[in-house]
Amino acid sequence: MSLTLHLMASKPVLYSLLVFLLSLVAYAQRNESVVIPGSSLSPSLNRTSWLSPSGRFAFGFYPQGDLFTIGIWLIHQTEKTIIWTANRDDPPVSADATLKFTKSGTLQLRTEADVEKTISDASEPAASAAMLDSGNFVLYKNDSSIIWETFDFPTDTILGGQNLSMGKSLVSSVSELDQSSGRFSLNMQGDGNLVAYPVNSSNQPDDAYWSSRTNSGVGDLLALSPQGVLAILHAEKVLASSSYPHNNNGSIIHRLTLDADGIVRLYAHHFDRDNNSSMFMEWSSLPNQCQVKGFCGLNSYCSVTANKTDCTCYPGFDFVNPGSKFLGCYRNFTDDDCIRSEDSMVLYGMVGLENMWWGDYSYSVVAAMEEDCSNSCSKDCNCGAVLFRNNICSKFKLPLRYGRVDKDKSAQKAFFKVIARKILTDLPGPSDPNVRVVTDGKSGLVLILATCLGFISCLCFIFAVYSFLRYKHQVRRYKRLSENANLGLSDDFTLRSFSYDELEKATGGFKDELGRGSFGAVYKGTISGGDKTIAVKRVEKIAEEGQREFQAEMAAIARTHHRNLVRLLGFCIEGSRKLLVYEFMSNGSLADLLFKAAIHPVWKQRVKIALDVARGILYLHEECGVYIIHCNIKPQNILMDDTWTAKISDFGLAKLLLPNQLSRKTIWGERATEFSYFAPEWQKNALISVKSDIYSFGVVLLEIVCCRRSIELNAPIADEIVLSSWVYNRFVAGELDKLVEDENVDFKTLERMVKVGLWCIQEDPALRPSMKNVILMLEGTMDIPVPPSPVVSDVDVP
């Protein structure tokens, strides 16, 4: 009778038998290759590893791309099988690195930059070391007792003869090629249960996706014997057993690995007489990849077709990174209009999928018919999706976790809110045949939408013809102006051209000054019979020989159109006189709203303003075609229109300054406190990039949160003078409530905004996020790590 049958037939004997089997590993310790103090390894030398006596295991440097990592691996494999990795989340090292077993008895890694890091943390110096045939690398005292071993610090794998004790865990790798910590963990819990979780979860039962179901209530031990028996010892439960018979020459090596996809698998490596091996999978914890919670990210679902697993965004969502689908999806529209609209059903439609399941709790469960269920979500600004089953309607907020196709939910439908005009384009093409797209509403909805789209297409055609004729007229007009002024304006320059006399008359002789900034004064005026209000900027500090550069910048600014940018309407160039005509912003600047107004804007309005500014900067950095670095983001350059929408002004003008004017004093203006909006690279004369704008946005974001200036010399206590330091100290102390005086603050949103602001003002530009990621973090669709302390440089105030 086989070993497995004996174990299953005689549970009381299991513990004793496994202890005996595990003790056989001591035999390997008598047949070892000893490493003495002073020995070293390096990728640049001939010796890169220390081998076990059988030559099947190696400890040392293994390649990771063009760099190297320290670990243990099985050799004589078609593909390298990594068993253990040292300091797995540290970056790989170059070929100039050295690993030395020092004479003081420690394993010491020295990188190419002469940085030293200890690999072993033994309690006392070691006298020798060895790579054993068990796959364990050990350090010995003089009396040959082990003082440190890799078996005590598993990464994603345990081998035959190795245990996973209570409180320890295996953490998956990112991939087979990248052994740093991945997205899943296998925990040996104190209650005797072996459980798999996503690593970014709360490790609660709702987050678990596999369990050994051995809840004994006491500490337990997961053991893998050299013969391939996998068992929970105290619970006397065998999870898996090798199909290969036992042999004493160690030609079969068993390993249990939490693979990068989150599934636990038992493998057998069979070695022949020439030490070549073949690998077989003997056991798997889950039959279906989609049962792994977190395999697909937020707002996406997992499906399997023809043994191929794929992640797909729900309707109304796009991938955060199409090349890394596991990162999840973000909503491809905002629901700001839902709050302002009296009838949100006009704005939104519902697109549905059948056979859907996800792992979140609903905030509302009511009895309803299918059509009433989907309609109730389209009317509810808090609702992102609903599940309908057996006349029960469950509403859910976003984001949605752990989505997957579930054939057992054949009578269940999920409906997702999308913009009405996108209801056709957002219909998914699921790869799983068990998924069927459903749409709500009346049977004539598609016909109505098709008719509307046809009508809109006709209007667009008519508008295109009109625009073309208008464009040709403008081209001829500007050509004539170009010839008269001898400025050579390009044919695609379609702004309105004003004369100086027209603007002088429109502004009443430039009497009503609205403000004065880094590039000149701004005056209020009216045109078109006095019924259209404009803002006229007299641009100063522009070189006379720079007129063609001025013309090119105006052409670039004219091509920018975004709801969060102040629109340029026209220009005037007459000799040294250069003026710009903008739309008028009736509610002043953000600086007036935050620092001068008797009543500060409410919390929801401040959150909206922050997102408005972020979307405007994203457009300038990535979407407008002529990428623009603003160089002067501050509350004075953020204006508010009559609907309290924030719009960025003065973009694209920084390039027009003379080289000797591109100094801190010129850019920062006359107020010394405005230096705080500028990134440290300004004072260091380093390269100015989009990350400089992100630094400025971070300062403005913290000002929006706290409704105060970044430097407040009249602060009641010295700790509050510098806003960034005060915010960070309150964040670390868990006292964010001291930053705001509002009563109706959403503290989750407050924490998100503070963390984003602190990331944006990091001194190292490489640490600052892109503006796209800033928006995703502010919207709550991307996790935000805890930010380090922003380093505030000492700046000489001009």
Image: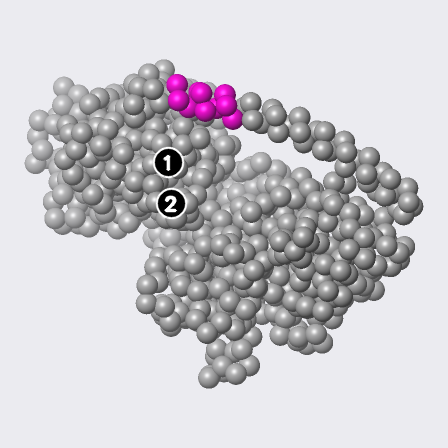
Query: Around disc 1, counting alpha carbons within 10 Å, would you say few (fewer than 14), some (14 to 19), or many (20 or more)?
Result: some
Quick one: SS at disc 2? Answer: loop
CB under 8 Å between discs 1 and 2? yes
Q: How is the image coloured?
A: one colour
What's the magenta region? 447-456
Which residue does the image show at 17% across and 33% down from the upper left?
A: 368
- Looking at the rendered image, the quarter that the N terminus falls into is top left
Residue bearing the label numbered 2: 341
Sequence-earlier tag: 1 or 2: 2
Q: Mainly helix, strand or loop, the magenta region?
A: helix
In this rendering, the answer to whether 335 lies above or below 749 is above
Residue 658 is left or right of residue 394, and the answer is: right
| Residue drawn where x is 38% and y is 52% of the image | 148
Which label sits on residue 346? Answer: 1
From the viewer's perspective, tell me whether residue 458 is left or right of residue 293.
Answer: right
Residue 788: % across, % down? 49, 62
